[in-house]
Image: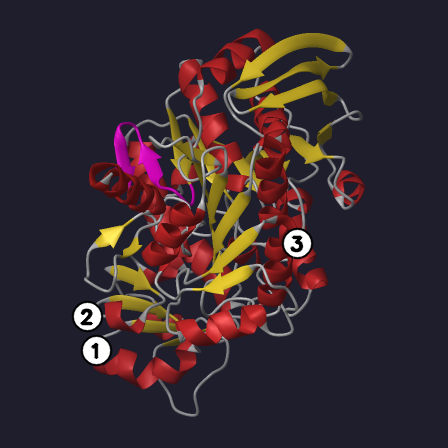
Amino acid sequence: MNLQQLISTCLVKNDVSSLDSLTITSITQYIDEVRSGSLFICIHNSYYDGHDFIQEALSQGATAIVVAKLPPYPGPFILVANTERALAQIAADYYGHPSRGIRFIGVTGTNGKTTTTVLIDRILAYAGYNSGLIGTLYNRIGQDFLPTPNTTPHTVELQQLLRQMATAEVTDCVMEVSSHGLKQDRVLGIDFHVAVFTNFTQDHLDFHPDMDDYYQSKSRLFSRLGNRFGHTAKMAVINIDDPIGPQLVALTPVNTLTYGCGQGDLQALDISTSAKGTSYTLSLFGKHYPLRTRLIGDFNVYNILAAFGAAYAIGISPETIICALTDIEGVPGRFEIVTTNNNITSIVDFAHSPDGLLTVLQTARSLTKGKLFCVMGCSGNRDISKRPIMAQIAVDHADHVFFTTNNPRKEDPQQIIRHMIAGLNAPNYSLQKNRKLAIREALSMAQPGDIVLVAGMGPRAYDDDGLNQMITDREAIQTITQAKTLSN
């Protein structure tokens, strides 16, 4: 592709007339992907600075390099003010602007994004839409389920994925939109039709310098909905029960559908929860619809309200949405009940933030006839400040807690656990670095009628006992309980 065409939408700040005839065969922000014919875009973020690899990129055959600061020597450099924004513009052009023929529903918030997007996707499928999904669990195009390393894919990978969706004639795409993706302009150029806000609590302070920066990043999804009144009205679907909900309502220039428990355009009334599901009345502009769902907990009431609002925003009837929600069994790793043979209830949940952990513990407690045990850890190379907060929440709301390893990444698991228990003054916890062994100890201590909540990993797999055999929490619980049953 011609270089001048690729950079035509960028604000170029230097003379690049000598690069008129250059042809680009690939674009990337990663130095290990640079080859002959590549356009290398230097991204500067909290992890690395692409400008440090300019010489290496040239030696690997880069045809041209997009920079935010010119090196002190001549070269095929394209100077722009913001390389992340330029990357989004270039990637969209390189892949032929695949998002233009797709209607997008974006979901952002600290907790509930995954469940809400999966619910919306299943409603769309039930209603006969050819939809796609981009999120934490997987990316889906038709019947193809693709692995995903990030909640919101990096810019080039996202445009590649959207090109696949366009080729598969996907009409509607439901996307988890992370604060990372918004701050780094990964989704720049995608014209969202509906933006959904779930909630806002502490998380990702390893990436954001403070909560205000975290909020400002989240709010971009709503401020960017734009103020042009086209032939199809855009809509923001906002949790009005959350303290920042009213701020987002004021921020967005488009129509806003608010939801909550007892207030908002869309409300959940007369909520009744049991171990088998939740029933309540949905009130939309004062009209009532009874609903019974297999999803458990108040947090899932909010997820369902958000999904209902998004589906209604694109024109699906309330009756169709209700029918779809009634059929949904649940979402893997999100308050997922794992059946055992000994009358001990095990629950697997992805809760990895203070508010998320508190919510699932409170829900589990409301269902517990006996004692509540919790197995949990915190991930490595992530927000350190939330570790002792989550540990305190765990010991405050469970009868006994087993602190263990989550996903340590490049951090020492023992150090993570030390951060968690620092200053903790409670007798009701144990330490077990090996996650599967921690689950085994919890299940061994539990008696019939008790609940064991295993939090933090959800459906994600990890190394089983250091044997390079990957296993999920669900599989660990089933393996342990089966072995226990056989031994008895």
Left or right? Give the position of 283 relative to 449.
right
- Image coords of residue 184 (percent x, y): 52, 60
Q: Residue 136 shows which numbered tag?
A: none
Residue type marked 2:
Ser
The CA distance from mark 1 to mark 3 is 56 Å
- Image coords of residue 281 (percent x, y): 68, 13
Mark earlier in primary sequence (2, 3)? 2
The number of numbered discs placed on residues in the rendered structure image is: 3
Q: Is residue 396 above or below residue 363?
A: below
Residue behind mark 3: 396
User: What segment is highlighted magenta in the picture?
Assistant: 135-147
For the C terminus, the image quarter is top left
Mark earlier in primary sequence (1, 2)? 2
Q: Along the line of sight, which residue is nearer the eye, 168 or 59? A: 168
Instruction: Please tell me whether mark 2 or mark 3 is closer to you in this view.
Output: 3
Mark earlier in primary sequence (1, 3)? 1
Q: Residue at the location (37% across, 68% down)?
A: 409
User: The residue tagged with tag 1: helix, strand or loop?
Assistant: loop
Left or right? Give the position of 22 relative to 310.
left
Whether residue 42 is visible to the viewer of this picture, yes or no, is no
**Looking at the rendering, which quadrant does residue 75 occupy?**
bottom left
User: The residue tagged with tag 2: helix, strand or loop?
Assistant: loop
- Image coords of residue 331 (percent x, y): 43, 32
Left or right? Give the position of 328 relative to 82.
left
Residue behind mark 2: 36
Q: Residue at the location (28% across, 36% down)?
A: 145
Q: Is residue 35 above or below residue 243?
A: below
Q: Along the line of sight, which residue is nearer the eye, 153 or 145? A: 145
Q: Is residue 46 magenta?
A: no
Q: Along the line of sight, which residue is nearer the eye, 182 or 215? A: 215
Q: Mark 1 near mark 2, Cβ–Cβ under 8 Å?
A: yes
- Identify the coloring: secondary structure
